[in-house]
Amino acid sequence: MRFTLKPYQSEAAEQILDNLDRARTAWHRDGDLTAFSLTATTGAGKTVMAAAAIEALFNGTDDFEADPGAVVIWFSDDPSLNLQTRDRLLEATESLTSSDLVVVEPPFAKPKLAPGKVYFLNTGKLNKNSLLTRGHHGEAEGQLSGLQATPDTQGWTIWETISNTIDDEDLTVYLILDEAHRGFNPARVADKPTLVRRLINGHAGYKPIPIVWGISATIQRFDDAMKAADATKNRRALPRVQVNPARVQESGLVKDTIALSIPDEAGVFDITLVRVAAERLKASAQRWARYAKEQRDTTPVVPLLILQSPKTPEHDEIGEALDAIAEVIDIDQTQVRHVFGEHKVVRFGRWDVDWIEPQRIEDKTSVRVVVAKDAISTGWDCPRAEVLVSFRAAKDHTHITQLLGRMVRNPLARRVPGDDRLNAVDCILPFFDRTTAGNVVKYLTGQLDDMPGGGQKRVYLDGRDLLPNPAIPEEVWQLWESLPSQTMPVRGARPVIRLVSLAQALSADDLRPGAIRAVKERMVPLLDECAQDYASDLDAAVEEIWSVKVKEILGRVGGSKLSYRDFAVRADTRAIRTGFNFAKAALGSEVAMSYVDHLAREADDEDSLRDAFVKTAALASTRKVRERVDAAANAMVDEWFKEFGADIRSLTDERQQEYETIRGLAVDPQKSALGRSRVRMEDYKVVDKDSGQVKDAELRDLHVMADADGNFPVSSLNPWELHTIDTEMARPGAVGWYRNPSRPAMDSLTIAYRDDQGNWHSMHPDFIFFHEVEGELKASIVDPHGHHLDDAGDKLRALASYADRYGHHYDRIEMTSTFGSVTRSIPLHDPVARAGVLETGRPALEHYHSDIAVIYGV
């Protein structure tokens, strides 16, 4: 893969491969049909996960054996979506070439599909009028016809080609059903269920597809598609692969905030809000240009504005909107395109607007405005689309939210650190009113499956930019940057691979030339030392690799008794290669191959080279060796991060993110540095939970990020949290406070913790307060958290563990909960209270009622 997968993407790819392996075995051994789904929200990178699995399916990995007969059919309803998917696969994978990714077009005169290729099909290619099937009679009025005439200039119909491929025992057909888009709505595509049914289940004597892999935004969509195809009766369901939306949001791949702009009352179309949209686009372009200059990037993001029309558009009205946009930003009709069903020039007022293929919009940066109806929400993505003006009425909120789901990808595929505005998308809704807006906010933040992150996504009705508060001393920011944050552990991380990744990064940035050579110079002698110190363990491991254990079962014809005999045979080249693959996984390819070269540097025969591979594999499989090598690798990583920390912080955001990713490639939480916020967005309106009415947010001062009047809106805070701010800022020596963002980011203090099942999670304490204490500026963590919540005990222990390790950085670390009119606190900076939490394992409620708790604020 050319891309480095996010941890959740790697885990999903592993689960997909496990399902594919089971499905392949079930088909060739038992003839069983199977199906499973990959379910992930918009922006999770489903195509990237699929690319990783397809590449492994064709070429294998250290942990997965390739299928030399694998044939992949990628099926969707939208040919433009197929083209975008093909481009993404080509971009993401190293081994797949354009000739391996075949868009099936007539004439397609092939008796079978070839292994090692992905074939793209869509509904139109399978219907009765297609040139690939013309003359083919499958099911006609419930009857099967045995005669099929082949299409002109073609020896086989596409149905015959697929069926012949399934019939070949040396091939395995995998169907990827990409149905996470509008095209799978039977009301829109009347013959779709029939076509999917024929493709999956077989028809007219043709065999069914052996393995079906569905890719969908929701489980329900895939289940519905399979039921519509009657594919659930005789097909075994394998475990679903589900991606947690919260992990997608945390990854930074999708934008954090949706800023809604809605008039006080819905009414006749008003051009004013269109001008607002144009101003937002202009400001966004300026911000991206400024950011690119800061980051020394020669290709800044060019943001895009989308005009969404009703199903029956008023062309003059759209023309009027384009006129208003042109008054704000300098555009002509060559910079405007539409994606209507009519693939021709459409006239909007004085504007003659040409059609553009949806998948080309992202790369054609000369296009600044796109006019769309529904086509833009059919599954393709456009990360640079940052402003939406929708002429849809309030009753069409589903169409608007689906469209927003296409716009949430971050254009840099990462969160811009400390800048909420560049991590946001603007949605202008001229035909909505404030009453409807409240319901839209609830819908966007929790109930819509297509919106990534679920309740974690922020939707603002009056989002405004906040900048560093000039009333806050510089010393507060310096103290903030010195506080320890933590990275999230990565399952299966390897210390040596982490070290090599760091060495490669330091070399690439000219911070430590020759870093990879330094790793080899440290690790190769260490492996020699281990070979001497653990000689007996090494000999046993070598013997284990050379000997392949075999069990023989003997029985006499006509007899009832069986006898068993165990024996060993000498490993062949394949078995040795399997052992060495484990060494590469444990030590990394660089170190493993360097040690083989070291052992075989004077070898002049094949046996000596084979012995070198075996010895390296044996060392990697010896637990004592791995522990010693891992410790040395971790020590070298820590040394380099300490030595080059200041240099790393001077690099661009993208490079700093690379180092933070490397820092986090560990099985335990790692200490991470905090950074300053640049621009923060907060909502100056609040939606009443009961009535849905919109009202102004309360304000507080002395937040480190503030508006021009020095205020910070507390629209997202509950009464407990407001009480915490007022209590802390009333203490003597109060200097400022910080509302900690609830997401892993440079400007968010993060604490990693494990739940009772051993799964890692992150918590983000609500507040950091800054006080003058005996003449010294000190930070304090106060986290109000309901004792009744399911994670109360886990988070209390997490904060206690953090306090045990890093408490010397703080004046106080407290977790609080409210009981009626009284708020109680557990002072985790106190060793006795901390020990009570860490050593007893009692529920949070019991701790609050024990003698380690105190009345908060007294």
Image (cartoon, rainbow, N blue to C red):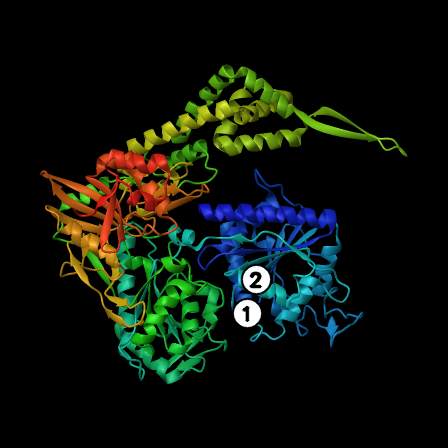
Q: Residue at x 29, y 31 (%)?
A: 643
Q: Residue furthest right?
A: 558
Asked which quadrant contains residue 318, the reply is bottom left
Height in image: 646 above or below 520? below
Label 1 close to label 2 by CB (< 8 Å):
no
Marks 1 and 2 sit apart, C-alpha to C-alpha, by 13 Å
Name above or below for residue 719 compared with residue 141: above
Q: Which mark is residue 222?
A: 2
| Percent position of residue 135, x then y | 74, 73
Residue 401 is left or right of residue 147, and the answer is left
Residue shown at 37% from the left, 31% from the top: 637
Which amino acid, mark 2? Phe
Instruction: Label 2, secondary structure: give it.
Output: helix
Residue position for label 1: 183
504 to the left or right of 711: right
Q: Is residue 467 left or right of residue 54?
A: left
Query: Of the residues under marks 1 and 2, which one precedes in the sequence?
Result: 1
Is residue 95 visible to the viewer in this orientation of the structure? no
Q: Residues within 10 Å of mark 1 (few under 14, many from 20)?
A: some
Q: Looking at the image, which is closer to me, 23 or 374?
A: 23
Query: Which residue occupies the foreground of this view, 408 or 349?
Result: 408
